[in-house]
Image (tube, rainbow, N blue to C red):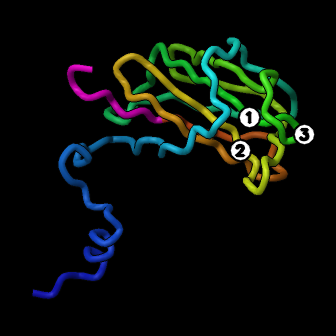
Amino acid sequence: MKIPAVYLLVLALGLAPTGATAQAYRCSPTPADADGPFYRPGAPVRNQIGTGYLLMGEVRSAANCQPVDRARIEIWMTGPDGNYDDRWRATVVPRRDGRYYFVSHFPGRYGSRPPHIHLRVEAPGFQELFTQHYPLPGHGEAIFDLVLTPAPSGN
């Protein structure tokens, strides 16, 4: 029996669902990304730390694509000079319908990394998510939905 090449590629890349990862979701979860060395809990609650860049979106459940209530988004990024600082940290509380917005400057470069904004998202009944948004140069806004994976039963 000849196995189609696409199946071999899926298996080679480790993309085939197995065990606990076989969960089917109606919405694709937001991919996790590195939290980096500068995360610190306790950022002040605010939706703005600068001007010129608007990040907005919805916090939704991967299970049913519905808005997630009581989520909190912690954000940290570099200042315009490319350095991390407490001035460039915030905790954003989305509305009950899951929508959020955050206004800042366009993030500065950090070393050889492209401009990015770190996000940590938590909500009751969902797994914590660390991810990053990579703004496109020349754009003043972006939509970045945060789709959370339900926590395993019993957590």
- Give the alpha-carbon distance from disc 2 to disc 1, as whole Å: 7 Å
- Is disc 3 in contact with disc 1, using a CB cutoff of under 8 Å? no
Identify the residue at horizontal 63%, vertical 29% (top origin). 39
Residue 124 lies within the magenta run:
no
* In the image: residue 56, left or right of residue 127: right
x%, y% of residue 36?
Answer: 62, 40
Nearer the N terminus, badge 2 or badge 1? 1
Mark on residue 77?
1
Q: Residues within 10 Å of mark 1 (few under 14, many from 20)?
A: many
Nearer the N terminus, badge 3 or badge 2? 3
- Give the alpha-carbon distance from disc 3 to disc 1, as whole Å: 11 Å
Could you tell me what secondary structure mostly forms the magenta stretch? loop
Q: Between residue 5 and residue 117, name the one nearer to us.
A: 117
* In the image: residue 106, left or right of residue 75: right
How many callouts does the rendering have?
A: 3
Span highlighted in magenta in the image: 147-155
Question: Regarding mark 3 in the picture, which secondary structure is present there?
Answer: loop
Q: Please tell me in which quadrant of the rendered image residue 154 appears.
A: top left
- Which residue in the protein does label 2 denote? 116
**What amino acid is found at the position of numbered circle 1 in the picture?**
Met
- Which residue in the protein does label 3 denote? 81
Residue 154 lies within the magenta run:
yes
